[in-house]
Amino acid sequence: MIHADRILMGPGPCNPYPEVIEAFTRPILGHLDPDFIQLLDELNDRLRKVWRTNNQLTFPISATGSAGMEASFVNFVNPGDTVVIGVNGVFGGRMCDVAARAGASVVVVEEAWGKAIDPQRLLDAHPNPKIIAVVHAETSTGVRNDIELLGKNKGESLLLVDCVTSLGGIPMLLDEWNVDIAYSGTQKCLGVPPGLSPISVSDRALEFLVAKPQSWYLDLNMIRNYVTGDGARAYHHTAPISMLYGLHAGLGVVLEEGLENAWARHQACGDELHKRLPELGFDLWAQPGHRLPDLTTVTLPEGLDDAKARATLLNEYGIEVGGGLGPVAGKVWRIGCMGHTARMRNVRMLLGALGEIVS
């Protein structure tokens, strides 16, 4: 049975905005229909506003966030290029795998899970890498890595940033921070179901596009002729029309609320969780000063069974939270407050449920 009343407070999909659900019911248009092209152009402009960028090549890839990661590497890495990657969780590690498959010589800068990466370590790891890559908000640990210092001091390197858990939830200023390549997902702070991966590429980075990437489907040389420009668009693939309706609507909700207000709403929910969870015996795990407001990680009270407690939350209270990954599986919870889910009423419902479970 599919339950429609779940409160999704894990690290995966959040509850979508009501406007997004309504958008999915709109009649289907052809992917080259002039009305759809106009909607796509509006969507791309909304993405630029939420990402605080003027990058012309800003659009949603027709696949989930991992495809955005892959597109960001295969389109800019030639065999033998040096790529410095920060790893302090699952998704930094995944970056290394993707870059290596594209033929990169990967220089790994590791930090303990739950800790932020010192930007200077990334800058000092190699004198002149092609790319410096890092996850802004590490979904597996609830840690925010600093981006601004990297952008100021990266030299001729391209700065590539994973924004899957940050876009729309915490400040992410692509142009001001001098980010060259960024990708995200729709299912977290944008309040849209999973299925698309927004990506943004600076004009400077476009000068380094690989002429013929190993992936046909993710080849930005071809896709840019469909998603940008005036007049007729060159067909590349059949766009997922309804998903794009949903993202158009979700971005509209965020911009109508005001981006700063959306950031503040996520922060307020995170602050309340960070204040109240320790009172219930859940200790905050991520490094102080680098804790995400939209994804809170905690260690469990002594004696609390991970799987049993999360099952009780799900089956008796209708609340889903995420467990730990890798070395902290069974020891850490990942509690998401993202998109439409980032409401104080949801925070209080969770805290009330946890109070009953641990009493």
Image (tube, grey):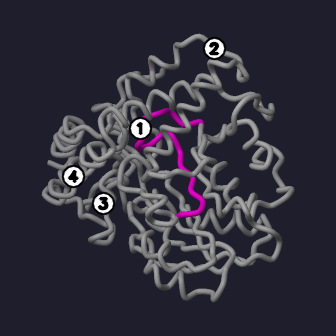
Q: CA distance from mark 2 to mark 1?
A: 25 Å
**First reached walking from the N terminus: tag 2 or tag 3:** 2
Residue at point 19% right, 49% down? 358
**First reached walking from the N terminus: tag 2 or tag 1:** 1
Q: CA distance from mark 4 to mark 3?
A: 10 Å
Q: CA distance from mark 4 to mark 1?
A: 17 Å
Local crowd at mark 2 within 10 Å, few (<14), some, or many (≥20)? Answer: few
Q: CA distance from mark 3 to mark 1?
A: 19 Å
Indicate the amino acid at tag 4: Leu
Q: Which residue is mark 1?
A: 14
Q: Nearer the viewer, mark 4 or mark 3?
A: 4
Task: State the image coordinates of residue 85 (x, y, percent, origin top left).
Answer: 60, 73
SS category of the residue bearing label 1: loop
Q: Nearer the viewer, mark 2 or mark 3?
A: 2
Q: Which residue is mark 3?
A: 298
**First reached walking from the N terminus: tag 3 or tag 1:** 1
Of residues 215 and 309, which is closer to you in this image?
215
Task: State the image coordinates of residue 284 (x, y, percent, origin top left).
Answer: 26, 64
What secondary structure predominates along the stretch shown in magenta?
Answer: loop
Highlighted range, magenta: 179-195
Residue at point 53% right, 81% down? 122
Q: Which residue is mark 4?
A: 273
Per the rendering, the mark at residue 174 is none
Indicate the amino acid at tag 2: Ile
Q: Which residue is mark 2?
A: 28
